[in-house]
């Protein structure tokens, strides 16, 4: 169907001889734009969420300093389901400045038995010591950081499976083309399994082409490839001649060169 006289009969061959074997053939420019746009949106989402929340949510990204503080006051409180106390503490920063903080301790808390004058571990932001709390308790009720990665992960889990079959198809075709044997074949059957996708992925396995060819040893082999080339597939009636490249050690491992001609 096409003139493949420029292609050497024996390997090795350069994939640059056929434009359809370029990795860029997997996507068109609209798809690339769509993917880049969504990667940016999904990447900015967790950052935006963290910045929008209070400072406790950003605790994992702040380098806190640790000092010993002391309890200065205990005030009864009723914010818990059981008896609770509002524990007020005082601490000094590394440069000697004094700061205060509060902690609501319920009856089942490890700090519920503390009294005035008792010590407790305090962590604080050295750039803004007013942001402080008891070590191990500060930020404890905040959602884990992994929650902010849910949407990017969902996006990746949806997008990558859509790309992988196409990428695998082109990489396999490149490998067979570089080291395979060229022969003539004919079409046996065209199976149409059109897939509808939001994105226009080139090389998507939407059509199944069954074909046969004869190896250099005289064996007749039947194989199958997938393509989205509707224009070419419409011209491939039963018995249509095609150019095939196959691996000599695994004759069924083959491609139809006509689908990679541009």
Image (tube, helix red, strand yellow):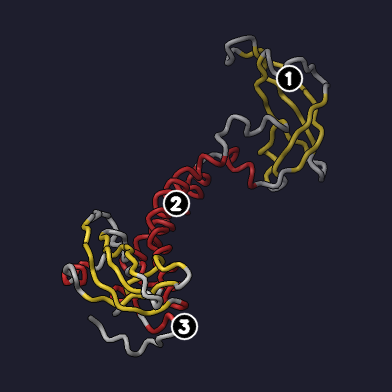
Of residues 211 and 201, the one nearer the viewer is 211
Relative image position of residue 188 (x, y in whole percent) = 23, 65
Which label belongs to residue 182?
A: none
- Rendered image quadrant of residue 24: bottom left
**How far is disc 1 from disc 2 in space, using C-alphas?**
42 Å
Q: Are marks 1 and 3 in contact (CB under 8 Å)?
A: no
- Rendered image quadrant of residue 90: top right
Vertical order, 54 against 110 (above or below) = below
User: Could you tell which of marks 3 and 2 lies nearer the N-terminus?
Assistant: 3
Vertical order, 225 against 87 (above or below) = below
Q: Are marks 3 and 2 in contact (CB under 8 Å)?
A: no
Relative image position of residue 83 (x, y in whole percent) = 64, 9
| Residue carrying label 3 | 11
Question: Would you say 52 lies left or right of 252 here?
Answer: right
Residue for point 24% across, 68% down: 229
List the single residue furthest toward the top.
83
- Local SS, label 3: loop
User: Could you tell which of marks 1 and 3 lies nearer the N-terminus?
Assistant: 3
| Residue carrying label 1 | 110
Of residues 68 and 158, the one nearer the viewer is 158
**How far is disc 1 from disc 3 in space, using C-alphas?**
74 Å
- Local SS, label 1: loop
| Residue carrying label 2 | 156
- Local SS, label 2: helix
Residue for point 50% across, 43% down: 148
- Rendered image quadrant of residue 184: bottom left
* Classed neighbour count for the residue bearing mark 1: other residues with Cα under 10 Å, few (<14), some (14–19), many (≥20): few
């Amino acid at each position: 169907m096409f003139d493949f006289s420029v292609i050497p009969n024996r390997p090795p061959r350069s994939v640059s001889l056929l434009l359809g074997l370029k990795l860029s053939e997997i996507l068109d420019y609209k798809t690339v734009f769509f993917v880049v746009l969504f990667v940016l949106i999904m990447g900015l989402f967790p950052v935006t969420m963290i910045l929008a929340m209070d400072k406790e949510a950003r605790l994992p990204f702040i380098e806190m300093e640790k000092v010993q503080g002391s309890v200065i006051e205990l005030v009864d409180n009723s914010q818990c389901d059981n008896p609770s106390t509002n524990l007020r503490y005082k601490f000094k920063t590394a440069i000697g400045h004094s700061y205060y903080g509060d902690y609501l301790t319920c009856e089942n808390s490890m700090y519920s038995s503390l009294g005035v004058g008792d010590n407790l571990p305090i962590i604080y932001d050295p750039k803004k010591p007013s942001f402080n709390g008891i070590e191990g308790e500060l930020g404890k009720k905040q959602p884990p950081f992994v929650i902010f990665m849910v949407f990017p992960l969902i996006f990746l889990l949806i997008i990558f499976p859509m790309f992988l079959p196409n990428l695998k198809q082109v990489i396999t075709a490149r490998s067979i083309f570089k080291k395979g044997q060229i022969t003539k074949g004919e079409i046996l059957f065209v199976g149409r399994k059109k897939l509808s996708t939001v994105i226009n992925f080139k090389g998507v396995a939407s059509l199944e082409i069954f074909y046969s060819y004869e190896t250099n040893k005289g064996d007749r082999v039947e194989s199958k490839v997938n393509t989205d080339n509707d224009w070419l597939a419409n011209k491939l009636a039963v018995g249509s001649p095609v150019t095939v490249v196959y691996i000599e050690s695994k004759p069924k491992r083959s491609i139809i060169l006509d689908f990679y001609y541009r």
